[in-house]
Amino acid sequence: MTVEEFHCGVCKKTFKNEKQLQNHLQSKKHKDNYAKYRETVELDEGTEEILRQEEERKKAEEEAEQQRIRDEKLREFESSQKKKTRKAPQPEEDEEVKEAPARENEEEDEYVSKNKLKKMSKQKKAPKPGSSGATLKD
């Protein structure tokens, strides 16, 4: 079984995966070693231009990613604000607003549960406190 290795020629280090190599390339130690390496090695103009373009491309990608993240957070925030302040849809001017018919006696239409009805009927039938329920005759 072959194991893929990732290598930094400047620092002469080997890594197990690309993520480790990318982290290394962003490290201060690698950047210091790279600066020393560039001082000792003279690169031709074409190579210098390619390196400069690559650095600009990476910087632009990072900025674009940061902007994308900011935009996404802003959309999430705006969406959450809309949900908090969402109002019932208003009818358009062309649509007629239908009103409920007026009720003469609202108490009749009020819902009363079966248990409440039983309780009310028991209260009506129950004798008043202090009375024995029997009537006295003279």
Image (cartoon, grey):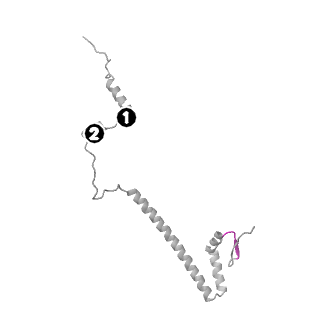
Quadrant housing residue 62? bottom right
Amino acid type assigned to the residue bearing label 2 in the image: Glu
- Residue 44 location, x and y as percent? 63, 89
Q: Residue at x 63, y 72 (%)?
A: 22
Count neighbours of disc 2 (C-alpha within 10 A) and say few if under 14, some if 14 to 19, many if 20 or more: few
| 87 left or right of 104 in image | right
Residue 2 vertical placement versus 105 (above, below): below
Q: How many marks?
A: 2
Quadrant housing residue 77? bottom left
Give the camera-side residue of 108 and 55. 108
Q: Residue at x 60, y 82 (%)?
A: 51
Q: Residue at x 29, y 56 (%)?
A: 95
Q: Which residues are magenta?
A: 12-17
Residue that carries the numbered disc 1 in the rendered image: 113
| 8 left or right of 114 in image | right
Residue that carries the numbered disc 2 in the rendered image: 106
- Residue 43 location, x and y as percent? 64, 87
Amino acid type assigned to the residue bearing label 1 in the image: Ser
| 104 left or right of 58 in image | left
Q: Is residue 109 magenta?
A: no
Q: Earlier in the sequence, mark 2 or mark 1?
A: 2
| 63 left or right of 98 in image | right
* Secondary structure of the residue carrying numbered label 1: loop
